[in-house]
Amino acid sequence: MQTLPTVDAPCALCGGDRAERVWTTADRAFAVPGLHTVVRCRECGFLYQRPRVRDAHLAACYPDHYPRHQEPSPRVPFTGRPARVRAVRWALATGLGYARLRDAHAGLLTRLRARRLLRRLRWSCPPWRGDGRYLDVGCGSGASLGVAQALGWRVAGIEMDTAAAEKARRFTEEIYVGDVRSAPFGRASFDVVTAFHVLEHVPDPVAVVRRMLEWLAAEGLVIVEVPNAGGLGARLFGRAWSGLELPRHLSHFTPETLERTVRKAGGRVVWCWHQAKPRYYLWSLSHVLRDRGWDSLVRVVESRPVYGALKLLLEVTLPLARWGRRGEVIRIGAMRG
Ligand SMILES: [Zn+2]
């Protein structure tokens, strides 16, 4: 396979042309040929890929077995024993605005269990708003749509990849196949609009967020999740950081640059959460070892007992990254400005 044609585009955030090189790597996941470079804008500090693959060829960076295009497995929360389901309903009712799930007879144990469950649930379930109209931008094969639908939302999606969009249709007929900017949904027609791990893939993130904000009804919420280039992993691992994902990730946001993106698009960030999972650090660690040619060590790290032990160790220490607001992933809620 030949290297794909590239474009030397300036900073998508400020338009600045001056930049310094930060990291260069090959494609570690799907072997798109060539070396790919992340630069830092000298004007505003934004981290972005430059040069990057031309818009018309971006689809060639995504193979058929790209994870988001595989069979969807929605994390619908109503699973397990009746006692757990009761706690889930209570958590959704009291913590995420699902008033109709409220059960006046919920006991103390249910309420305590709900409080513990809520920490996870708020990552997989959108908070209830308005009339329950939900749009997922870059919905892939539709896992998030499946969850929202099970929670009572009327759902719609946008997806570039035809095969993935076809799978997402099992949840709704309202799937637009194509670019966010040309999607035909009307102004103010959704209460929640999400984009999970999408913004880092698009050439013009400001335009995409602007469009998402336009689709919001009054009091509606945009939710965006991206890898955090300002987190501990990027600092520790540099060019081996698992969030780089070159050449597919065109932008590398920090909480600060993501907020600037939202403001430029006409919105304001109302909250920012940090998340870290052991596997993100372990992927980065494998990249470091491979870069040094220590492939036998990679096999040791990836062997089940060692991987399990490292994962457990990280599981214990990771809350620190979240509390210190240096997580591997950031998720923001934003409203119209
Ligand atoms: Zn800039």
Image: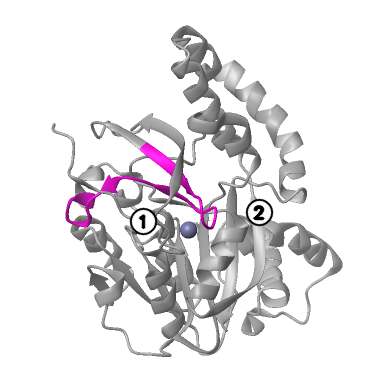
Residue drawn 55% across the image and 25% down it: 285
Q: Which mark is on residue 274?
A: 2
Q: Is residue 48 magenta?
A: yes
Q: CA distance from mark 2 to mark 1?
A: 29 Å
* Residue bearing mark 1: 10
Q: Amino acid at mark 2?
A: His
Indicate the position of residue 265 as horizontal and vertical percent values: 47, 76
Q: Which residues are magenta?
A: 37-58
Indicate the position of residue 247 as horizontal and vertical percent values: 33, 41
Q: Amino acid at mark 1?
A: Pro
Residue 285 seen: yes
Seen from the viewer's position, the closer of residues 197 and 250 is 250
Residue drawn 55% across the image and 70% down it: 126
Seen from the viewer's position, the closer of residues 217 and 289 is 289
Residue drawn 50% across the image and 74% down it: 264
Say which element carries label 1. loop
Say which element carries label 2. strand
